[in-house]
Image (cartoon, grey):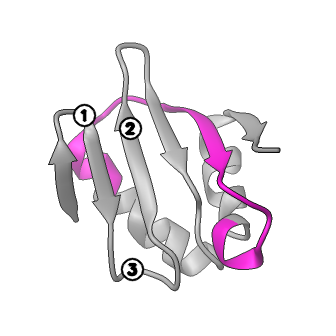
Amino acid sequence: MLQVTDGVWVAVGYALANSILLEGREGLVVVDVTECERAARKIRDAFSRISNKSIVAVIYTHNHQDHTSGARVCFAIYHCMLHLSI
């Protein structure tokens, strides 16, 4: 886990693609949720050690499987919104 700056972390080495955590005043935003639920759970657990806030949104940078397939891990627990890039 790498801290980029205040409120921004990157999960590197957990999966094929990196996942980013953005901490806002009202909750967390996750950018890209990796290729599988197993990797997404590991990342979610690492993120939960950083902040106890809920995930309020997930952003996909694009629709490739290695960026989207772990989404169920976030949605099942946090019932967060989905934001799609165009």
Query: Which label's residue is closer to the chain start, 3 or 2?
Result: 3
Q: Which residue is mark 3?
A: 14
Whether residue 50 is in magenta: the answer is yes
Magenta span of residues: 47-67
Image quadrant where residue 71 sits: bottom right
Whether residue 76 is in magenta: the answer is no
Q: Amino acid at mark 2?
A: Leu
Density class for disc 1 (Cα within 10 Å; few <14, some 14-19, many ≥20) is some
Query: Which label's residue is closer to the chain start, 3 or 1?
Result: 1
Spot the residue most to the top: 25
Residue 70 position, x and y percent, is 65, 67
Q: Are marks 1 and 2 in contact (CB under 8 Å)?
A: yes
Q: Looking at the picture, does residue 74 appear above or below residue 28?
A: below
Going 69% across and 46% down the picture, which residue do you hit?
Answer: 75
Q: Looking at the picture, does residue 1 appear above or below residue 6?
A: below
Residue 63 position, x and y percent, is 80, 64
Q: Are marks 3 and 1 in contact (CB under 8 Å)?
A: no
In the image, taking residue 55 as reference, residue 42 lies left or right, namely left
Cα distance in 3D space between marks 3 and 1: 20 Å
Q: Which residue is mark 1?
A: 7
Look at the numbered disc 1 and give the secondary structure of its residue: loop
Density class for disc 3 (Cα within 10 Å; few <14, some 14-19, many ≥20) is some
Going 54% across and 50% down the picture, which residue do you hit?
Answer: 31
3 vs 2, front mark: 2
Query: Which label's residue is closer to the chain start, 1 or 2?
Result: 1
Q: Which residue is mark 2?
A: 22
Q: Amino acid at mark 1?
A: Gly
Residue 86 position, x and y percent, is 82, 44
Going 34% across and 83% down the picture, which residue do you hit?
Answer: 13
In the image, taking residue 43 as reference, residue 40 lies left or right, namely right
